[in-house]
Image (cartoon, grey):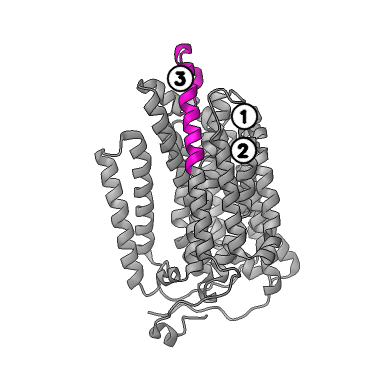
Amino acid sequence: MTAPHASPPQASPPRGSRRWTLALVSTAGALLTLDITIVNIAVEDIAADFRAGLADLQWVVGVYPLVFAALLLPAGSLSDRLGRREVFLAGVAGFTLASGLCGIAGSPEMLMAARAIQGIGGAVTFAPAIPLLVSAFPAERRASAIGVFSAVGAASAALGPLAGGALVEVFGWRSIFLVNLLPGVILLAGALLRITAPPRESWGGPLDLPGAALAAVALFAINYAVVAGADHGWRSADVAVAACAGLAGLAAFVLVERRAAQPLLDLRLFRIASFAGAAALSFLTRVLHLGPLAYLVLWLQGMLGYSPLETGIRLVALSAAVIVTSLAAGRLLGRTGPAALVTAGFVVIALGFVFLAQVGAETPWTVALPGLVLLGAGSGLLYAPLMTVSVSGVPPARAGMASGLVNAFFPLGTAIGVTVFGALLSAQVGAALADERLRTAVEAGRFAEVPATSLAAARTAFADGIAAIGLAGAALALVGALTAAATLRRRASPATPPVPAEEKADGRHGR
């Protein structure tokens, strides 16, 4: 089997082309990231329109980042073989089409299916984004370009609730998807005209299709087990089957990757403590940052009665804090090192969740305000250092693979966070409310359907669910702080896992 090889050095594109590439790729990244958070603000309207339950809402929110995460690694390998600009264009086209399908969905099932297609398009768009920037910019300018890309993505994720609130308030929930159509068309035209096609980086060897298929099956099965367990009961047959399928899929994936000549994921990277820690902490960051957002929205809109726009305005505290600390993290990283900065970020998040745990049946939204600020501030401190560690702590020949894996953990963490925190909320509400119809309405934030005689109990049950999310989030954040202190180096430096002799001989390593 022919080993992949790097293309010969070629001149960088002209400065104007670099700027267009940065602008277009960053805009695409902003759209993809925005779609992870913007839908949270519309969950109550979607639930009311379709009379959907909590499980449906969890899948509407979670299926996009789940599919996105599952396909990032294979999409990256595909872009190396078929051409990064070509794959980027295909992804933008698919994402734009799927956004239109979301906007005209007539049922929760159709919306979920369209969101899954969005996830496919998102992964195919995002996977070649960083490599396109690397190809466009000379070495001394790449860090700055990637920093701009990351900052735009963080800002779009943080501003999703506000943008979504304004759109839902004025045009209805379908507008949060239809708004992607015009930018998608502009991106397609701009990429065709302005992005210079870089050389393909890999010519030999097939894509690791067995590994890609096993990873996707395992991720879906595990996520289904968690979602269905909260809704159907943890002892139900479908939950047991899904959990077994997920665990078996993961085991098979590990076996396949260990034997593959050109694996989708080089498992030897996990021997590097800093990389393994960064990968796990990247997953945990999204669990804690975006996992509880849907339920905070349901609390503000459903229980406290704020409109989508009013809810978005109240969540600006979280958004602004993310933006401010994201911009500061790059400078702080050089002074403190990744271990101290990431540890501090998780401690700040833990304090934020402690404030969220103070929510009660009759407390105003301002009780959660310090928690929202701290949750945003701590999250903003984490993204840049973790991405830096994941790339700088591995051999250069594995940097793209490492970046792809950590990027995959971000949306996966969102999907699992939504599910896990949803299970906590459901357990609290279910323990307090015996009537199934009442429980279903309260879990989905549909307090308008709650009879006056049951309203006080419903408010107490839902507030207890938010408080439980706060306590669980604080505990998980402290685990993150301890993990960061134990695994991340004080200063990121390249490390090299053992390389088989045959790989050294055929020249794959270090290229």
Q: Amino acid at mark 3?
A: Ala
Q: Residue furthest bottom?
A: 505
Nearer the observer: mark 2 or 1; the answer is 1
- Residue 227 within the magenta-colored segment of the rendering: no
- Element assignment for label 3: helix
> Local crowd at mark 1 within 10 Å, few (<14), some, or many (≥20)?
some
In the image, which disc is placed on residue 457? 3
Q: Secondary structure at mark 2?
A: helix
Asked if residue 448 lies in the magenta stretch, the reply is yes
CB-based contact (under 8 Å), mark 2 and mark 1: no
Q: Nearer the viewer, residue 364 or 154?
A: 364
Name the mark on residue 161.
Answer: 2
Q: Identify the residue at the far right of this view.
A: 16
Secondary element at tag 1: helix
**Residue at (45, 34) in percent of width and height:** 57
Give the farthest residue toward the left: 237
Q: Position of residue 373 (x, y in %)?
A: 65, 42
| Image: magenta residue range | 444-472
In the shown orientation, is residue 10 left or right of residue 52? right
